Image: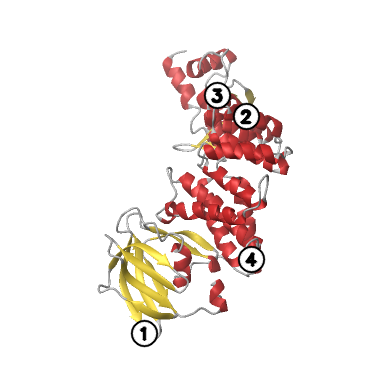
Amino acid sequence: MESDRLRQYRLHTFDNELEILRSGEAVCLSCLSRFSARKVADWEAGGKGESALCPVCGMRAVVGDASGLSLESKDVEEAHAAIYGSAEASPVGKKEQEQFISDFMDGKISDTGENEKLWLTYVERKAQSGDPDDLLFFGCALLTEFEAVKPDYARAKGVFEEDARLMDERAFRMLGIMYLDPDYEMVDYGKARECIEKAVSLGDGIACLVLADMFLYGLEMAPDPEFAYASYSNFFVHDYRPLVVGDVQKGYDYAATLFGHAAYRLGRFELSGISYEPDEFEALRYFLLAKFALDRTAEFSDPGTVLLDDWRDSKDRIKELSAKFSLVRGMPTYDQYTFRDSFEHSPEYPISNRLDGFEITDIAYDEESATLSFKAAASGLNKCLILDASNLFCDYVEGEISWKFVDVKSVRLPEAKDISVATIGCGDDSIVFFGCDGKGIIMEVEFQEDGEENDTHVRKA
């Protein structure tokens, strides 16, 4: 086939929505399927319009008879061979399979039964490479329930075992979870502990949280809720900084995921009453933070990293508790309660990845009204993670924030009205600001004793 003719076949697979709609018959240059143009249901956004995706293999390789190009078998096979290789070879190449996997997961391809089966087939083929990431992905895919494809627990277990032989810590962790969860129909706490401990030894952070779960509930070991709580808290505090300093991104996603799972467990612990009286409002704070972190990491974390049950349950718990407290989502109230909720968990860590972590300006104290006001902005990334459970708000706020502290008992003010703050310490009745370059405390605010309403920080109009 002449090169200019080949270019025409290529060109007519792009931005071809109108052309396909005008066509009666269409063919796929990738898998060589022939079908009515009316069967095209999925499209991919292009430079000037939409490009048709094959209803059989999902590839962007459809040409309709309205293109004016020959759709005779010999011409189509010749175009296929020139673009994808010989017609005797696999009709869908490796790059096309990977593109289909990605597009299906991104929702660019409809989740019909045929597409679900095709996606799983391509994921399985990819796993045949023996790469640990591909094996883990396939194992997790086998645990997923679709409309047309049911989970295959036994097969998933076999895939994880194959991956574990490559010393993939995530595979050991997934095996441990399968032995723990009755839904997978293979409960064995002894094997679960063995797999989880191996994952921990190989450095898997989430496995540490799962092991803490086993200590909490006394599964194959003596119950130790204090150890479990300490473990959850350690990950929560250690991994809080990646969220406070700015948006989750590659390099921070795993730490943020650990934070999310730790926050979820702390919320669940607050509800349990295992060691002390349940605190439902504190649990709500933790669940909001868990959802925030897992929302942002689930879409690009490694397969098997985000434990989806934690993610879903966090959302359910927020819905349940917000109904109990009659709360609705709104913009945050920038007072000392929101300030403390947003920053109390990171007193040891810089608020930004720069030394001058927080710029505070326009400091003003009104003794008569017992209020302290100031403006603050995070340096560098210029955004802060703000948590106001009363308004079900947990998100980044960019730019400068105007804060107003009320019920102020006393203030230790800096000499200047504008200061640079490196870290913040939040106590029950005070908030302390530490200066940069080892300057120590440069501002301290002490509050009047809270009443019962302020203990939960529920503020209603």
Kindly check if marks 4 and 3 are in contact, taking CB atoms under 8 A apart as contact. no
Within 10 Å of the Cα at label 3, are there few (<14), some (14-19), or many (20+) other Cα atoms?
few
Instruction: Examine the rendering and report whether any part of residue 161 can be seen.
Output: yes
> Residue 282 at x, y = what percent?
57, 65
Q: Which of marks 2 and 3 is nearer the N terminus?
A: 3
In the rendered structure, which amino acid carries the disc numbered 2? Glu
In the rendered structure, which amino acid carries the disc numbered 1? Glu
Q: Earlier in the sequence, mark 1 or mark 2?
A: 2
Within 10 Å of the Cα at label 1, are there few (<14), some (14-19), or many (20+) other Cα atoms?
few
| SS at circle 3 | loop
Q: Is residue 189 above or below residue 262?
A: above
Q: In this view, does 249 lie above or below 458?
A: above
| Rendered image quadrant of residue 384 | bottom left
| SS at circle 1 | loop
> Residue 359 at x, y = what percent?
31, 64
Q: In this view, does 369 lie to the left or right of 325?
A: left
In the rendered structure, which amino acid carries the disc numbered 4? Pro
Q: Earlier in the sequence, mark 4 or mark 1?
A: 4
Instruction: Examine the rendering and report whether any part of residue 459 can be seen.
Output: no
Looking at the image, which is closer to me, 271 or 377? 271
Residue picked out by circle 3? 130
| SS at circle 2 | helix
In the rendered structure, which amino acid carries the disc numbered 3? Gly
Q: Which of marks 3 and 1 is nearer the N terminus?
A: 3
Q: Which mark is residue 367?
A: 1
Q: Earlier in the sequence, mark 4 or mark 2?
A: 2
Q: Which of marks 4 and 1 is in front?
A: 4
